[in-house]
Image: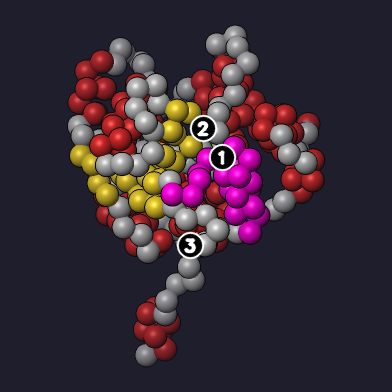
Amino acid sequence: MSGSASALAPQVPATPSRAVMRLVERAVVDFELIRPGDRVAVGVSGGKDSLLLLAALSELSARADLPFELRAVHLDQHQPGFDRPGFDRALARLGATCEVISADTWSVVSEKLRPGQIPCALCGRMRRGILNRWCAEHGFNRLALGHHLDDAAETFLLNLLYGRRLDPLKPATPASDLPVTTIRPLILVEERKVVAWAAEHAVPTVPCPVCDSFPESRRRDVKGVLAELSRIQPEVLASVRQALYGGAPGDASEH
């Protein structure tokens, strides 16, 4: 019977570490990502990044000094092979509920793809457009997405190498035609901290069944470049964080 009792024991809450929360709080304050009275929708895909974002903003919303409304939103894009039971398990692990929007973007994307073309950019634009419209229609003025520091570094290098411009990923991006601003509260958080959180708390995550099926992409190439740079300079991402977003050099020592 002791085994059954152990299996029924409540799990430890999957709360983010103090280091992660410090970086999230710094991003929110320094870049004015959330203000008192804001209504924030969190785009939850089921991946580790968006799940940590939801956990971190849930912690932040419980504080009395920054009152804001928070709601998790998931866009069901009708992608073949999406692990719906796994997504439900992830939400249950966080003790969260989620608004589900159904929109068959996959049929549109698959019709427009040229042979060998990777669908991520087109899919991402459509996803953001739908989520922005949902936010505007339901009175949410902030859409929070789970981009982290590694994403920011990769985007900067992609824009430099292929776009020939110095254009970092912005902490906040207002929509051009709607009263909604996309915010990125994890933008100062290294991906390794996201991975460690999911592993420590046994948070089930759901990979994208489409993007992960394409083994070659420029972003994966750039991720490899960053991995090589980290062999020369182990704190390369901390350097990128300070160069792009400011802050004290001591931030690099947080774990």
Q: Secondary structure at mark 1?
A: loop
Residue drawn at x 39%, y 52% as measured from the top left: 70
Residue 215, picture quadrant: top left
Q: CA distance from mark 2 to mark 1?
A: 9 Å
- Residue extending farthest to the bottom is 1
Whether pointer 2 and pointer 1 mark residues with C-beta atoms closer than 8 Å, the reply is: yes
Q: Nearer the viewer, mark 2 or mark 1?
A: 1
Earlier residue among tags 3 and 1: 1
Q: Residues within 10 Å of mark 2 (few under 14, many from 20)?
A: many
Question: Which residue occupies the foreground of this view, 31 or 43?
Answer: 31
Where residue 204 appears, x then y in whole percent?
Answer: 41, 56
Part of the protein shown in magenta: 18-37
Closer to the chain start, of discs 2 and 3, is: 3
Instruction: Please give the name of the residue rendered at 57% of the width and 44% of the height, measured from the top-left corner.
Output: 28
Element on which disc 2 rests: strand
> Residue 51: x percent and y percent?
44, 50
Q: CA distance from mark 3 to mark 1?
A: 18 Å
State whether residue 110 appears in this view.
Answer: yes
Cα separation, mark 2 vs mark 3, equals: 22 Å
Q: Which mark is residue 154?
A: none
Q: Give the side of residue 198 with respect to residue 223, left or right.
A: left
**In the rendered view, would you say 211 is above or below 51?**
above
In the rendering, at what x and y percent does residue 22 appear?
64, 52
Task: Looking at the picture, tell me which residue is in the foreground, 64 or 172.
Answer: 64
**Most common secondary structure along the magenta stretch:** helix
Q: In the rendered structure, find residue 172 and report the number of the disc placed on it.
A: 2
Counting from the top left corner in percent of width and height, residue 192 is at 60, 46
Q: Is residue 182 left or right of residue 32?
A: left
Q: Amino acid at mark 1?
A: Glu
Amino acid, disc 2:
Ala
Q: Secondary structure at mark 3?
A: loop
